[in-house]
Image (cartoon, rainbow, N blue to C red):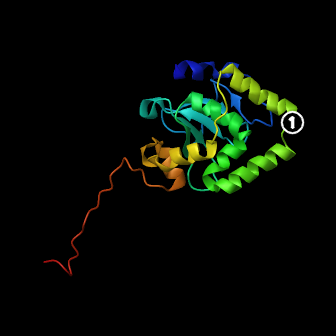
Amino acid sequence: MEQELLASSVHANVYDRGVGIIFDADSDSRYFCTPVGAYVFACTGGDGVHFCTIPDRFGDMIFVVEPMPLDEIHVRPVAQNFTDFIRVLPAVRFTGILLDIPLRTEAEFREGLQIFREQHETEEHTEKLRHLAAYYDVTPMDDPYTYIRSLQSTFDYKQIPFSDEYYELTGKINPTQHATFTYLKHPHFFN
C-alpha cells in the first residue's frame, strides 16, 4: 500500500513556492549525502534538499536529505511512512518549517508556524494543501512537532548507509569500517 502511494506521488501536482515540494519519481536530486540505496521521490526545489526512502534498510520510512544542513546531520527521518508524511505536510504548511523542527523548541516551532500563516499563507497555498490531503484521503497531523521529534530522537543515525564520498567530504568516520591499529615497538623501550 505505502509503495503504491509513494509511486503515485508524482501525480499529486502540489508544488508551488508556498508549499515547497516537487514530487518527482525521476528526480536527479542526488548529492554526496544521499544515502546508498535511496529512492528519491521529491525535492524542495532549493538547496538540494530532497526526500527519499531507503527501502532495503528502513522499509517505508521517509527521510529528508539536506546537503547544507544548519547542523551536522545531513539525513533525518521525518515520517514512519508516506501516509504520515502526507499528513505532516499540511500540518506544517511549508517544507521549510518541517526542516526547522529539529533545531527549534516547540514554542519556536508554533511561533514560526503562526508567522508563516499570517505573513505568507494565501488562499491558493491553502487550496494546494487541501488538494494534497484530499488526493491521498488523509487529514493533517494534529501534532507534527512531537511526532517528528519523537521519531528523530529514537532513530539510530549510524545505520544510514552513506557512500565513501560522504565520509571523505565530511571527514566523519565510517561506522561500517573498523579501524585497525598497528603498534610499533620502539627500540628504546622494547628489547
Say which element carries label 1. loop
Position of residue 11 relative to residue 19, above or below, is above
Where does the image place residue 191, in percent across and percent down from the top left?
Answer: 13, 78
| Whether residue 66 is visible | no
Percent coordinates x, y for residue 109 in the rendering? 69, 51
Residue labelled with disc 1:
122
What's the residue at 75%, 53% (across, down)?
Answer: 111
Q: Residues within 10 Å of mark 1 (few under 14, many from 20)?
A: few
Which amino acid, mark 1? Thr
- Relative depth, front residue between 165 and 175: 175
Residue at the (64%, 38%) spot, across then down? 142
* 49 to the left or right of 170: right
What is the total number of numbered labels drawn onto the structure image? 1
Q: Is residue 176 above or below residue 21?
A: below
- The image shows residue 85 at horizontal and vertical percentages of 61, 33
Q: Residue at x 44, y 47 (%)?
A: 156
Q: Please report the residue visible at 37 percent of the width from the left and 47 percent of the height from the top.
A: 176
Figure quadrant of residue 64: top right
Farthest left residue in view: 191
Q: Return the residue nearer the eye: 78 or 35.
A: 78
Q: x, y percentage for residue 51?
A: 61, 35
Front residue (pair 98, 159):
98
Seen from the viewer's position, the closer of residues 130 and 16 is 130
In this rendering, the answer to whether 22 lies above or below 31 is above
Query: Is residue 81 left or right of 189 when viewed as pictured?
Result: right
Q: Is residue 151 left or right of residue 173?
A: right
On the question of residue 191 being in view, the answer is: yes
**Where is 11 relative to 78, above or below?**
above
- The residue at the far front in this view is 142
